[in-house]
């Protein structure tokens, strides 16, 4: 394991990257299901903002701009006993 220690994550946002391939999700002729915008509970807004900023910094997500994609979905932070 020590010889290949660079293959293991050292933290929750230590993510790898592979530039060898890119994939598309074939949705066939399915239509997207519209979802109304949702606001997080006030008590969770700062945590949600912190998570989104961290994900932006590490490249897990990217900004979409002012346009809205019909296939974009909502995300929800789930609280667990592990924090």
Image (cartoon, rainbow, N blue to C red):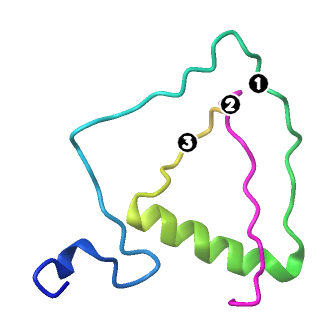
The span from disc 1 to disc 2 (Cα, nearest Å) is 6 Å
Q: Position of residue 62 (x, y in %)?
A: 48, 50
Q: Magenta residues?
A: 69-83
Q: Which mark is residue 64?
A: 3
Select label 3 or label 1 by which is in front. 1
Which mark is first along the chain, 2 or 3?
3
Q: Position of residue 83 (x, y in %)?
A: 69, 89
Per the image, the residue denoted by label 2 is 71
Query: Callout 2 environment at 10 Å: few (<14), some (14 to 19), or many (20+)?
Result: few
CB within 8 Å, label 1 to label 2: yes
The span from disc 3 to disc 2 (Cα, nearest Å) is 12 Å
Image quadrant of residue 66? top right
Per the image, the residue denoted by label 1 is 32
Q: The residue tagged with tag 3: helix, strand or loop?
A: loop
The span from disc 3 to disc 1 (Cα, nearest Å) is 17 Å
Q: Position of residue 23 (x, y in %)?
A: 40, 32
């Amino acid at each position: 394991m020590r010889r290949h220690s660079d293959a293991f994550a050292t933290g929750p946002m230590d993510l790898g990257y592979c530039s060898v391939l890119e994939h598309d999700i074939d949705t066939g002729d399915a239509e997207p299901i519209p979802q109304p915008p949702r606001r997080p509970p006030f008590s969770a807004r700062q945590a949600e903002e912190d998570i989104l900023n961290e994900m932006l910094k590490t490249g897990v997500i990217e900004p979409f701009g002012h346009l809205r994609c019909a296939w974009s979905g909502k995300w929800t932070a789930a609280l667990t006993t592990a924090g």
